[in-house]
Image (spheres, rainbow, N blue to C red):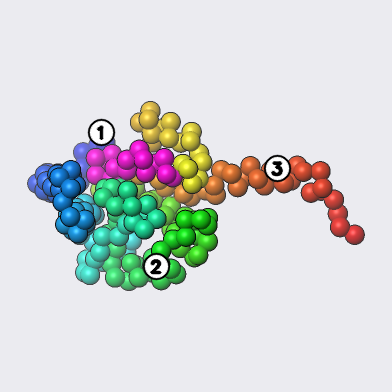
Amino acid sequence: MESASTVPTMDLIALRTKRDRLQFAVGRNRSQKWCLRLWGKFIKARDGNRCVNCGTLTTIHAHHVVRQTLYPWGRYELGNGITLCDECHRKVHEQFNGRPDLQRPLGALGSDDQDEWAYLYGLLSDDAVARRIDRDEFYYLGDFMLMFFIKCQGYEQLYELVVQRKLTRIRFAHEIWKSMPEDFYANVIEHMLAPNSLEING
């Protein structure tokens, strides 16, 4: 458990109630529209009803960090949402907002930017620390979502730190997306060590 929260006790009780309502609705297979509405209410309440990026209090939206069209199983994950204002939300979606091509690498169509994900997960983690909100309770990312990240990026050893409770799940998300995929480094080294890679073209 993390240190005492700066969020008033009554707000934490209300936040837990919103989380429990969401989990109850999902568990009872309520409509996706209803569950997403409950998820959005939870995300905005957790983030203090303000844009986590710029602090704006008006025209805020609950945004999925990893889009539902790419990873639908993360639709209701508490740690996969961040509150953004109209302006910040528009910037996130301005490059690409279509369906992903799952046969191509992440970001191949100008979408699903791993740097953006790392930034947003880092904002969430830092905001939780600053406001002293328990990251494992209110920013939870399930094992399947973490395994999806590992499948994309590698770095399975980071998950061991989560299991040992040395790294929170939301910080794991930030750390895994802030680096190039593990395979990228292996391929670069392999290419550099290949016999013909050191030849000088004359």
CB atoms of marks 1 and 2 within 8 Å: no
Determine which quarter of the picture holds residue 195. top right
- Disc 1 marks a residue whose amino acid type is Met
Name the residue tied to disc 1: 1
Q: Magenta part of the protein: which range?
A: 134-149
Q: Earlier in the sequence, mark 1 or mark 2?
A: 1
Marks 1 and 2, Cα distance to the nearest angstrom?
37 Å
| Residue 170 belongs to the span the image colors magenta | no
What residue occupies the far top of the structure in this picture? Answer: 164
- Disc 3 marks a residue whose amino acid type is Glu
Q: Which mark is residue 97?
A: 2
Q: Which mark is residue 190?
A: 3
Where residue 128 appears, as percent x and y from the top left, is 29, 47
Residue 140 visible from this viewpoint: yes
- Circle 3 sits in a helix, a strand or a loop, which is it? helix
Marks 3 and 1, Cα distance to the nearest angstrom?
43 Å
Where residue 130 appears, as percent x and y from the top left, is 29, 48
Where residue 183 appears, as percent x and y from the top left, is 59, 44
